[in-house]
Image (spheres, coloured by chain):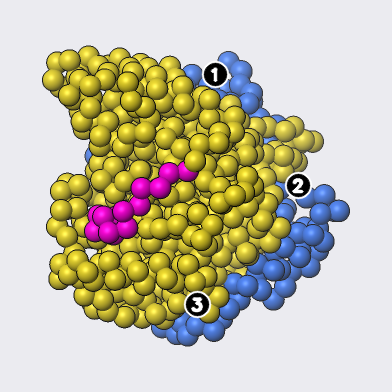
Amino acid sequence: MADLSALTLDAALTGLRNKDFSAKELAESHIATAESANASLGCFLKLTPDHALKAAAESDARLAKGEARPLEGAPLAIKDLFCTEGVETTASSKILEGFKPPYESTVTRRLFGAGAAMVGKTSLDEFAMGSSTETCAYSKTVNPWRANGSNAALTPGGSSGGSASAVAADLCLGATGTDTGGSIRQPAALTGTVGVKGTYGLCSRFGVVAFASSLDHPGPIAKTVKDAALLLGVMAGHDPNDATSLDVEIPDYAAAMGKGVKGLRIGLPKEYVSDGMPEAISDLWKTGADWLKGQGAEIVEVSLPHTKYALPCYYIIAPAEASSNLARYDGMRYGLRVDGEGLVPTYEETRAAGFGPEVQRRVMIGTYVLSAGYYDAYYLRAQKVRRKIADDFAKAFEQCDVLLTPATPSGAFALGEKTDDPVSMYLNDIFTVTANLAGVPAMSVPAGLSADGLPLGLQLIAPPLGEQTLFAAGAALEEAAGFTAKPERWW
Amino acid sequence: MSVSKEDVRRIARLARIAVDDSRLEGLAGELNSILHWVEQLGEVDVEGVEPMTSAVDARLELREDAVTAGDDRDGVLANAPKSEEGFFVVPKVVE
C-alpha cells in the first residue's frame, strides 16, 4: 500500500469513502509515523493512540453504513492549548502539569464530532507566548526542514510550532493552532504549510487556554488550501459558551476556492516594504503579485500608515490581557502548588516555579502597564492606537478586496538564535500582528523556497468575514506557486 | 519612563511572582528594553480617538436564566492540588 501519511486530508477523505483503505489503517499509519518521528522532531507532548483508534473504529462503522461525517476518519494533531476531555492539557507550562480538563473545547468537540481522530497534543511556546516554540517547558521542537547542505536544527516558528512541524512532516493530516500575533501563520510559513485564522470570533475560544482574549484566534494548519478550507468549515461556528463568538452562517470555504481572482483588487501595503527586507522576501512578494495579476486580478498600492506601531501596541495589550488571564493560576483549584509560608507566599512560590521566564516577563509587563499611574500612558494609549490600526484596514479595504504581503521577515532560523533578545523575537510577527489587532481574517500560503532551500510564505488578509475571498485568492496563489517541495526525511 | 529594581520588586509583588533579589537587576534591564521599545506609541496622535477594546462590536446576548452546568463536585475537584471531603484545601486565608 502507498504511504498513507503522505496523503492530503482531501485525498484521504476521498480514499476512505472509496474504501481504498480503512480509517483504522489510516490512523495506524499516522500513529506509527508520529511515534517514530517524535524523538527527533519533538512536536508532540503526548501521543494519543487510544483516542485515535477508538475514533477510527467508529469511523469505519459509519463509513460501512455510508454515514460518513465531513472529516470522517481524519487523524489530526491538536495544539496543547485546546482542552481535551480527560487528556492532559498543559499549554506547555509546568503550572498545568498533569491537568486533565473535565470538558472538551468547542473547536475540538466540533472536529471530533465531524469524525476526526486525535493523534496527539502538540507542543507550543508556553501559553502561546513566543515565535519559535522554544519557551515550551517540556520539549525541544524542531523544524523538519533544514537548510541545503546543513544539519543544523531550525525552529518551526511558533507558537503553534508543534502543529506546524507535525503537518509538514506528515505526522497528521492537519492540525489545530491558535493565532494571537501570528502564531498560526508564522509557523505555517516557516514549515511550508498553510495556516489560517478567521475573523475574530469565527472559531470559538471556549476551552482554549486563554492568552490575550481580544486577540486569540483558533484556526487550522494544513497541507493545502483545500485542506485548510475543510478544517476551518468544521472548526467555525457560533458557540453560546463564548460571548465573542460570531453568530453567522458558515459558508462552504472549499467551494469559494473555485471563484478565482479575476477582477479582484489586490492591495499591496506600501508600509510593508522595509529597507532591511531580504531580497528573497521582496522578490517573492513581487512574484506573488504578478501571479495574481496573471490570473486577472488588479494590483493596487494601498497605505496602512500605522503599521510600524502595531508590534509595540500588541506588546502592551497582549501582556495586559495575559496578566489578567493568568491570574487564575494560583495553585488552589488545579495545576501546580508550591507551599509557602501562608497564602500569599504560596501564590508567589507557585507562580515563580510554574511560569517560565518569558511568561513571567509578560505577566510583569502587563501588570505594570495596568497599574495605577501607568494605565493611561500605556494601556489606554495602546487601545487608541489599536483603533487607528483597525481604521487603516477599513480604509484600505475601500480600495481593494484583499491584501497581499510577505508572511514573515525571514525563513526558519536556528534554535537559540533569537532567545537572548526578546524584542528581536517579537519582530518575527511584524507582518502578521496587524490582522490580530484589527480582527480580520488572514492566511499564509507556501509560495517558494529561499536560496538555501527553506520554505517562504505569502500572506493574504481580507476584510471582516471575507474568508471566501481569502480562500479564492489563496487557491490562486497556491496554484501559481505550485509549491510541492517537502522536507527531506532525516528524522 | 524606566523601571528601577524597586519598581520590579513592586511589580513582582503585584503579579504574585516570587522574585529573588539577585534577579531584580536583570529583570529591570529586560523590562526597560521592552518598555523603551513600546514608548514609540507616544508619537501617535490619539486625540479624540475612542479606545478599541474588541475586534467585534460587542453585543452581549441575554440567555435564559437556567442551570446549564453544575452538580459535578468530583469533576470540579479532580484537578485540585489538595482536597478533602469534597472541599478544596487552601492555606489559611483569614487570621
User: In this rendering, is residue A256 above or below A162?
Assistant: below
Co-location on one chain, circles 3 and 1: no
Percent coordinates x, y for residue A91 in the rendering: 54, 39
- Residue A475 falls inside the magenta stretch: yes
Mark 3 crowdedness (10 Å alpha carbons): few <14, some 14-19, many ≥20? few
Say what secondary structure mark 1 lies in.
loop
Report crowding for label 1: few under 14, some 14 to 19, many 20 or more residues within 10 A (C-alpha): few
For residue A175: magenta? Answer: no
Q: Could you tell me which chain the residue with mark 3 belongs to?
A: A
* Disc ID at residue A27: none
Chain B drawn colour: blue
Q: Which mark is residue B86?
A: 1
Between marks 2 and 1 in the image, the one whose residue lies nearer the viewer: 2
Chain letter for the yellow part: A
Residue numbers of the magenta segment: A474-487
Q: Quadrant of residue B82?
A: top right
Give the structural element (helix, strand or loop) at label 3.
loop
- Could you tell me which chain the residue with mark 2 belongs to? B
* Residue type at tag 3: Ser
Residue type, label 2: Ala
Q: Which residue is mark 2?
A: B18
Q: Give the quadrant of residue A469.
A: bottom left
The reply to whether discs 3 and 1 touch (Cβ–Cβ < 8 Å) is: no
* Amino acid marked by disc 1: Gly
Whether labels 3 and 2 belong to a single chain: the reply is: no
Q: Which residue is mark 3?
A: A274
Q: Is residue A119 visible?
A: yes
Q: Residue at x 50, y 83 (%)?
A: B44
Q: Nearer the viewer, residue B19 or A136?
A: A136
